Image (cartoon, helix red, strand yellow):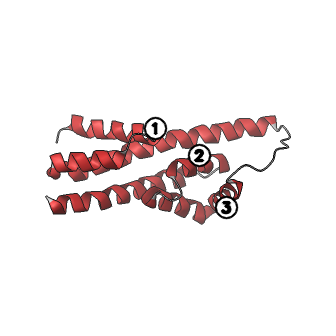
């Protein structure tokens, strides 16, 4: 596998982090079947790319939260659909240790969706030094768990 292939996998990872219609797991499966010797490199490149894409969501939410805090407009709205789930996630993310664990579980298991957790983590003020390693470790674990059966089957 060339460095260009790894770069392409990282690009797919970034794109799949930002556009939910692009499936990184499917890319890993197809690439792994085509080149089984490169499946772990592809998994690592996808994890790095997805983490970079989720950091974009995280930073965007963090900056928008800072701008909203400056405006401080009173909001009188009815509770939205899913507000209780969002409130629970926000409560978890605001706690120092549970915030990192929530990101790690979301990044590895996909529940709750990592895109949602990335935005809420940025909005609630989770520190980058907690978010980035937890997201990266979770994504590596997820993609390696997908890659192992592919290698075993070939």
| In front of the other: 83 or 2 | 83
In percent of width and height, residue 135 lies at 46, 53
In percent of width and height, residue 136 lies at 42, 53
Q: Residues within 10 Å of mark 2 (few under 14, many from 20)?
A: some
Point 40% across, 36% down: residue: 15
Quadrant housing the N terminus: top left
Decide which of tag 1 and tag 2 comes sooner along the chain: 1
Q: CA distance from mark 1 to mark 2?
A: 14 Å
Q: Is residue 5 above or below residue 110?
A: above
| In front of the other: 78 or 63 | 78
Q: CA distance from mark 2 to mark 3?
A: 14 Å
In percent of width and height, residue 97 lies at 58, 65
Residue furthest front as drawn: 81
Helix, strand or loop at mark 3: helix
Decide which of tag 1 and tag 3 comes sooner along the chain: 1
Helix, strand or loop at mark 1: loop
Please indicate whether residue 27 sits to the left or right of residue 126 in the image.
Answer: left
Please indicate whether residue 2 sits to the left or right of residue 72 in the image.
Answer: left
Q: Which mark is residue 119?
A: 2
Q: Which mark is residue 42?
A: none
Q: Which mark is residue 88?
A: 3
Helix, strand or loop at mark 2: helix
Residue corresponding to mark 1: 19
Point 28% across, 36% down: residue: 8
| In front of the other: 153 or 53 | 153
In percent of width and height, residue 2 lies at 18, 38
Contact between marks 2 and 3 (CB within 8 A): the answer is no
Contact between marks 1 and 3 (CB within 8 A): the answer is no
Quadrant housing the C terminus: bottom left
Point 29% across, 40% down: residue: 9
């Amino acid at each position: 596998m060339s460095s260009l292939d790894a770069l392409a996998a990282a690009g797919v990872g970034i794109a799949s982090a930002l556009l939910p219609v692009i499936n990184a797991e499917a890319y890993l499966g197809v690439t792994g079947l085509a080149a089984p010797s490169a499946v772990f490199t592809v998994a690592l490149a996808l994890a790095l790319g997805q983490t970079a894409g989720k950091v974009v969501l995280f930073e965007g939410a963090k900056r928008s939260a800072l701008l909203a805090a400056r405006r401080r407009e009173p909001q009188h709205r009815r509770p939205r659909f899913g507000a209780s789930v969002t409130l629970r996630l926000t409560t978890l993310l605001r706690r120092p240790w549970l915030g990192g664990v929530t990101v790690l579980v979301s990044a590895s298991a996909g529940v709750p969706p990592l895109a949602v957790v990335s935005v809420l983590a940025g909005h609630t003020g989770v520190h980058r030094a907690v978010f980035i390693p937890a997201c990266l470790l979770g994504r590596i674990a997820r993609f390696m768990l997908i890659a192992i059966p592919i290698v075993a089957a070939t």
